[in-house]
Image (spheres, rainbow, N blue to C red):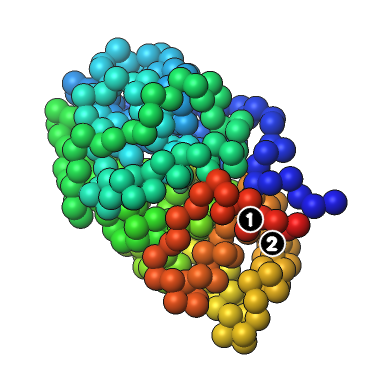
Amino acid sequence: MSKKFASQADLEEKKVSFDKLSDNAYAYTAEGDPNTGIVIGDDAVLVADTQATPVMAQDVIRRIREVTDKPVKYVVLTHYHAVRVLGASGYRPQQIIASQDTYDLIVERGEQDRKSEIERFPRLFRAVESVPGLTWPTLTFKGEMTLWLGKLEVKLLQLGRGHTKGDTVVWLPQQKILFSGDLVEYEATPYAGDAYFEDWPATLDAIAALQPEKLVPGRGAALTTPEQVQAGLAGTRAFVSELYATVKEGARAGKDLRAVYRETYDRLKPQYGQWVIFDHCMPFDVTRAYDLATGHRDPRIWTAERDKEMWQALEG
Ligand SMILES: [Zn+2]
């Protein structure tokens, strides 16, 4: 029997953890579902990635209210994906901040991405009718931006492309705590349907060069020691590198996408098959890698229709 499309068969609710990393930083994680980072400054709260709907954001807000009554002033989008940004309105922030590259992706493909992501993973869009529309940044930057939440320094850094072209990390230099978005995953499969495989390892090097002592990945548990941070970076790097090397080899040998997909799936399954959303991500990841290896420098836009056609071609 063929596999059910993407994560349409994934219906089991995950258990949420709200972990304190320092007096100023918390991680909202849920067993491999998309994470949200929380930074509490002297006078305001910053939220990094929002959850998928305003209704789902209420659970994050409830936990924030257990530790502070300061207002949520800033929402930072680490990148443009619907599952991380469409809950933004739930926080009623003063500013929604993203890199200019992320803004450009929302203009170019935000609408298609929203429709595609909702169909891929309905469970993650609980109360999807509460989403008022696309989330538009109110403040954009190129390269780097610093926010001062009172005496707490918060840096927003574009360290390079990887998961998308707009990837931004949130960095607390005084405490060496980093929120990576989907550039780093932990025991969760990196989604690479919009990725720049050739840039991603160098971007991970740039994260490592900051020497974070704690890191909140895009999915998976908060990493709370330098050793765990290293493991998260190494695992993500190994997956991305092995996948791209395998696909490139097949493409160079003149094999078609379906053949390369089977080969890559079989090669990676023993090592990474237990990571969450492995079966969901692999068709998208291999398709993007194959495109890149055959001359599509930038990711082609995923639409709900293209998603299904690709799935049928590779898994049907
Ligand atoms: Zn993403």
Position of the C terminus by quadrant: bottom right
Q: Secondary structure at mark 1?
A: helix
For the point 25% across and 29% down, the residue is 74
For the point 56% across and 60% down, the residue is 285
Inspect the image, locate mark 1, and give the three-letter code of the amino acid beneath it. Answer: Glu
For the point 41% across and 41% down, the residue is 111
Residue 202 position by quadrant? bottom left
Answer few, some or many: residues within 10 Å of disc 1's Cα (few below 14, many 20 plus, some between 14 and 19): few
Residue 47 in the image: x percent, y percent? Answer: 33, 30
Residue 2 in the image: x percent, y percent? Answer: 80, 52
Q: Name the disc covering residue 309, or none.
A: 1
Q: State whether residue 220 appears in this view.
A: no
- Which of these two is toward me, 170 or 194? 194
For the point 59% across and 39% down, the residue is 119
Against 80, is 136 above or below? above
- Which of these two is toward me, 108 or 37? 108
Against 273, is 21 above or below? above
Ligand 1 contact, mark 1 (Cβ < 8 Å): no
Inspect the image, locate mark 2, and give the three-letter code of the amino acid beneath it. Answer: Ala
- Which of these two is toward me, 141 or 232? 141
Give the side of residue 45 with respect to residue 245, left or right.
left
Against 96, is 164 above or below? below
Q: CA distance from mark 2 to mark 1?
A: 6 Å
Q: Secondary structure at mark 2?
A: helix
Residue 247 in the image: x percent, y percent? Answer: 59, 74
Q: Which residue has dot 2 on it?
A: 313
Residue 161 position by quadrant? bottom left
- Which of these two is toward me, 155 or 302? 302
**Dots 2, 1 in contact, CB < 8 A:** yes
Residue 194 position by quadrant? bottom left
